[in-house]
Image (cartoon, rainbow, N blue to C red):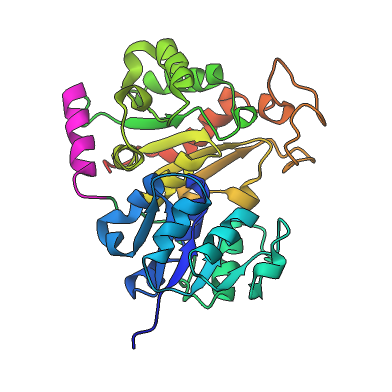
Amino acid sequence: MSRPHSVVVMPTWVGDSIMALASLKTAMLTGEVMLLGQAHILELVSGEFSHLLLPMKEKGVWSGARLLLRQKSHRGVLLPNSLSSALMALLGGLCTLTGTPRDGRGWLLARKVVPSSEHQALRYREILEGGGVTVDESPTPWVSLPPGAVEKATALLKRKGVEGIPLVAVHPGSSKPQRCWPVERFAEVCRAMGRDGWRVVILGGKGENQLASRLSESLGELVAVNVPQEGLSLAEMTALLSLCRLFVGNDSGPMHLASAVGVRVVGVFGSTSPRQTGPLLPQERKREVWSRFQCSPCRERFFQECSPIGGVAPCLHAITPQDVLEAVEELTSPPLEDP
């Protein structure tokens, strides 16, 4: 009888998922694990590993439990900290669970792991190791996109007439609006880069149309593609990102996607810390622009424990367009080769 798979219950956020995947490629290549997670996130690795994916098309405990009941695993590794993820796994037949004893669920776990690492990718790695999963030698971000995603992105750039032009991918959004550097400052950075021949690919997902439109209206003809306007899937957006030469944006999912497709990153950090959620890239391929306030990373009780400046968190207000442009200059001098 073959050894049953362990099921890894993936995080619900894109950036967290990329940080978790960074230790999972070996286990997936050997078929040691299956992944249960949001369908649009798992599509990022469906090119090579569709047979190891349990994609949830709906949210909720029963959605995941039904998928689990269709396969024969009994061991689960929970990367989310929630009680609901443990209940979903148990209802789905995973009777041996490993995870953090958070949210009052410790009594449901066979193996309790209290991670000691600072960076989130290493914390996920500790949980995976605690569940007996073979992890990669070192966390390295990666994706395996579905067939057709890169072709669609390439065709889009051709249709827009920007093939061969240096593209900078810009993400002005974040999971929490208070984490966002002001869109007007992103626009100032983009205009300065535009004078050097760059064109802009504006990244964003559901709910970020308005923010993307504000940046697009400010930049006019400098915009090559406005992703929310084009309605691209997450995998298609990632493919488009892989065709860019540089990423500039907030600490967010797209920042980690950029690291996974090998694009150089300029990440803007305010309430969060690059020591905890920085891109998994060598220093020569990234710059982390961080105001280094003593309270960062904070509990993100925005504007209860700090006073906004013009509606912006002080740690983000302190970062100037020139700070970001200097980071861009460091990563793009000498000029980058085509991707």
Residue extending farthest to the bottom is 1
Q: Position of residue 118 (x, y in %)?
A: 67, 58
Toward which corner of the image does residue 221 lie, by quadrant? Answer: top left
Residue 81 appears in the picture as rendered: no
On screen, residue 62 versus residue 55, left or right, reads right
Toward which corner of the image does residue 235 lie, by quadrant? Answer: top left
Q: Nearer the viewer, residue 32 or 185?
A: 32
Residue 211 appears in the picture as rendered: yes
Toward which corner of the image does residue 98 lie, by quadrant? Answer: bottom right
Q: Position of residue 8 (x, y in %)?
A: 48, 65
**Magenta residue check for 159:** yes
Q: Residue at x 33, y 49 (%)?
A: 43
* Magenta stretch bounds: 146-160
Q: Residue at x 49, y 53 (%)?
A: 62
Q: Residue at x 39, y 66 (%)?
A: 25
Count of number-bearing discs = 0
Which quarter of the figure is the C terminus placed in? Answer: top left
Where is 299 relative to 125, above or below?
A: above
Q: Residue at x 73, y 26 (%)?
A: 314
Q: Position of residue 2 (x, y in %)?
A: 34, 85
Which quarter of the figure is the N terminus placed in? Answer: bottom left
Where is 56 relative to 207, above or below?
A: below
Q: Position of residue 9 (x, y in %)?
A: 50, 60
**Magenta residue check for 283:** no
Q: Nearer the viewer, residue 285 or 95?
A: 95
On screen, residue 101 versus residue 143, left or right, reads right
Q: Nearer the viewer, residue 34 or 48?
A: 34
On screen, residue 284 versus residue 169, left or right, reads right
Where is 156 relative to 20, above or below?
A: above
